[in-house]
Image (cartoon, rainbow, N blue to C red):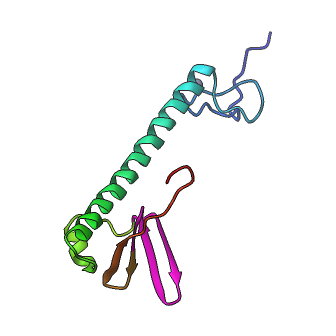
């Protein structure tokens, strides 16, 4: 009589860590319950990450929008950081000639080593909007 022997080289379930003793060699989960748990947790993790990033962008936008509303179009980066601005979060940035032109949603600005300048609303039309 042969005893069942677990193949130690069998892939392990991403959710519970149990070996996956049968099935396709690229199986990642031991059962549907583990597959659903893993995917639900991963989806929640991605939503939290995206919400955190959107939150930072919205805060940056609010700071720039406030500056524009009070008539400020140039500001030192150190002052922006003091206001709670996170410099690395923007929605686009590209080199135009020798200038670095960046956007946070529809606010456009130029970035230098020490300054954000020429702040302006850059109203643009998105498909489906006026
Ligand atoms: Zn499992």
Name the quadrant containing residue 23: top right
Who is closer to the viewer here, 36 or 115?
115
Determine which quarter of the picture holds residue 101.
Answer: bottom left
| Residue found farthest to the bottom | 98
The magenta segment is 89-108
In this image, 13 relative to 24: left or right? Answer: left
Q: Position of residue 24 (x, y in %)?
A: 78, 30
At x 34%, y 51%, the residue is 55
x%, y% of residue 33?
Answer: 57, 20
Q: Nearer the viewer, residue 41 or 89?
A: 89
Q: Name the residue at the right extreme.
A: 1
Quadrant where the N terminus lies?
Answer: top right
Most frequent secondary structure within the magenta stretch: strand
> In the drawing, does residue 2 fall left or right of residue 118?
right
Q: Is residue 121 left or right of residue 64?
A: right
The residue sitting at the top extreme is 1
Q: Residue at x 39, y 80 (%)?
A: 110
Residue under the point 66% across and 33% down: 28
């Amino acid at each position: 009589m042969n005893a069942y022997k677990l193949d130690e080289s069998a892939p392990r379930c991403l959710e519970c860590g149990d070996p996956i003793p049968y099935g396709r060699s690229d199986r990642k989960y031991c059962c549907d319950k583990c597959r659903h748990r893993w995917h639900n947790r991963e989806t929640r993790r991605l939503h939290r990450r995206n919400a955190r990033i959107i939150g930072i962008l919205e805060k940056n936008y609010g700071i720039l929008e406030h500056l524009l509303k009070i008539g400020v179009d140039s500001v030192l980066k150190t002052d922006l950081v003091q206001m709670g601005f996170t410099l690395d979060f923007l929605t686009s940035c590209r080199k135009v000639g020798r200038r670095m032109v960046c956007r946070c949603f529809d606010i456009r600005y130029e970035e230098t080593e020490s300054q954000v300048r020429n702040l302006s609303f850059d109203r643009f039309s998105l498909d489906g909007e006026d």
